[in-house]
Image (cartoon, rainbow, N blue to C red):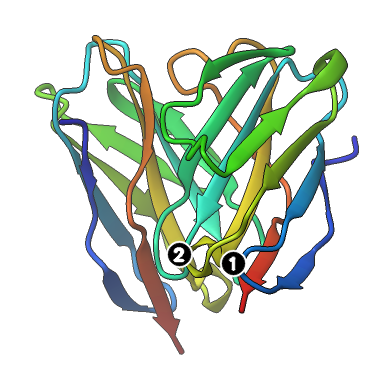
């Protein structure tokens, strides 16, 4: 059964680094993991994507261990405007061929 | 570059009525997705089109939901008849090519449906 699991919520303070982990079973070697950010009354917005090791862009890093059973979104030095819901999206191939979103992690950044 | 457009933004109907949502993807994008997002949950894929062909509609409740993408551009999602549990945000997204292996998707603002 293809499934993704994320923590329901997290709290942080401005300037701190935040790490959000998504667990995903049965993921194949080349299946991508993508992270999206969603604000109230808006559609999800792309943050970062990868399928192995580490990917970094101007806003985040994505860490994927060798066993690929999880991935971690890292947000450096968060600000109040990073308060949002963060979703991992995994494409499960290998017979499933399913796009599965996690339930989302609600991040609250405090002053 | 214009983003994904959806209309209407809000809709209130009574149960057993019909409703339709419209989506205009980013120009040139081959793949179009419809998702249902119930309050407090992650989006659930209802149907994925590549051009005007269906790639995946395994989670579309076909007894009441239908979708089409004529000419491989705009798309319409219809619910007939609506049930209370259909209350949700309906998100449309598009991606440039085949959508394979989780290609980056670009989402519209969504249509919020309330069924009374």
Q: Residue at x 53, y 78 (%)?
A: A80
Q: CA distance from mark 1 to mark 2?
A: 7 Å
Subunit under mark 2: A
As drawn, is B66 to the left or to the right of B29?
left
The chain to which mark 1 is attached is: A
- Measured as percent of width and height from the top left, residue B74 is found at 85, 29
| Mark 1 lies on residue | A39
Above or below: residue B32 compared with residue A42: above
The image shows residue A89 at horizontal and vertical percentages of: 39, 38
Q: Is residue A61 depicted above or below A8 in this figure?
A: above
Q: Nearer the viewer, residue A97 or A28?
A: A97
Dot 1 crowding, Cα within 10 Å, few <14, some 14–19, many 20+: some
Q: Nearer the viewer, residue A108 or A41?
A: A41
Q: Are marks 1 and 2 in contact (CB under 8 Å)?
A: yes
Q: Please state, as top left, top right, bottom left or bottom right, where the C terminus of chain B lies in the image.
A: bottom right
B64 on left or right of B107: left
Quick check: can you spot residue A41? no
Q: Badge 2: few (under 14), some or many (20 or more) residues near its Cα, within 10 Å?
A: many
Numbered disc 1: secondary structure: loop
Q: Are marks 1 and 2 on the same chain?
A: yes
Please say whether residue B6 is visible from this viewpoint.
yes
Q: Position of residue A49 (x, y in %)?
A: 45, 31
The residue located at (88%, 24%) in the rendering is B27
Residue occupying the point 60% across, 72% down: A40
The mark tally for this picture is 2
Residue ID for mark 2: A85
- Who's the residue at 53% across and 61% down the image? B86
């Amino acid at each position: 059964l293809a499934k993704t699991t994320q923590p329901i919520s997290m709290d942080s303070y401005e300037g701190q680094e935040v790490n959000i982990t998504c667990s995903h079973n049965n993921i194949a070697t080349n299946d991508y993991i993508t992270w999206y950010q969603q604000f109230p009354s808006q559609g999800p917005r792309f943050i970062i994507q990868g399928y192995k090791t580490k990917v970094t862009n101007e806003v985040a890093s994505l860490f994927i261990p060798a066993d690929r059973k999880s991935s971690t979104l890292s947000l450096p030095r968060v600000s109040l405007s990073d308060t949002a819901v963060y979703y991992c999206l995994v494409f499960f191939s290998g017979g499933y061929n399913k796009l599965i979103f996690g339930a989302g992690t609600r991040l609250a950044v405090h002053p | 570059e214009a983003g994904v457009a959806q209309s209407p933004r809000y809709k209130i109907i009574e149960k057993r009525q019909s409703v339709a949502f419209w989506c205009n993807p980013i120009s040139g994008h081959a793949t179009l997705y419809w998702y249902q997002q119930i309050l407090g949950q992650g989006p659930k894929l209802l149907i994925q089109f590549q051009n005007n062909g269906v790639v995946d509609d395994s989670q579309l409740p076909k007894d009441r939901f239908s979708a089409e993408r004529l000419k491989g551009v705009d798309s319409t999602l219809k619910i007939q008849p609506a049930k209370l549990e259909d209350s949700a945000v309906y998100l449309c997204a598009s991606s440039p090519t085949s959508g394979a292996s989780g290609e980056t998707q670009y989402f519209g603002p969504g249509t919020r449906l309330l069924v009374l």
